[in-house]
Amino acid sequence: MTLAAALFLIGGWGTLVWGFFVSTVALWHSSFTINSLSHLFGRRRYETPDTSRNSLFLALLTFGEGWHNNHHHYMASVRQGFFWWEVDVSYYALKILSWFHVVWDLRQPPRAALAASVVRAQIDAAEV
């Protein structure tokens, strides 16, 4: 409510509507999109008991949450993009905050969890 009041005082009704209400609704919709679209579109790196998928487009839209199959594979990780090429802006922000001791104990996926993709890739190659 402090943000809403500040935006209203700074710029009036238009600033309040766009800076608070529209941006909040857009944030909600992009978050809800992950739990629907990321089970339909994208690629599966890991075998999980659900239909979760990784999607670069959704990851860019939601600052990293589109790496949904990674999340379902190892949920305790702070980062959804397990590899350097998987853009995860939320993780980058948390990592920077950890440098200033605002957040700490950022859990990374263990090597065994990451290696599961290599095993699956070898199995897929053998099936071809």
Image (tube, grey):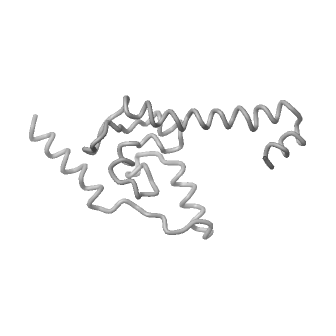
On screen, residue 70 versus residue 47, left or right, reads: right
**Foreground pick, 102 / 121:** 102
Residue 74 figure quarter: bottom left
Residue lying at 25% horizontally and 55% vertically, measured from the top left: 115
Query: What percent of the width, then of the height, locates residue 77?
Result: 42, 57
Residue lying at 49% horizontally and 68% vertically, measured from the top left: 105
Query: What percent of the width, then of the height, locates residue 108?
Result: 40, 61
On screen, residue 20 versus residue 25, left or right, reads: right
On screen, residue 83 versus residue 127, left or right, reads: right
Residue 93 figure quarter: bottom right
Residue lying at 61% horizontally and 37% vertically, measured from the top left: 27
Residue lying at 43% horizontally and 30% vertically, measured from the top left: 37
Query: What percent of the width, then of the height, locates residue 31?
Result: 54, 38
Residue 125 figure quarter: top left
Q: How many marks?
A: 0
Query: What percent of the width, then of the height, locates residue 19?
Result: 76, 37
- Compared with 86, 115 (above or below) is below
Quadrant into which the C terminus falls:
top left
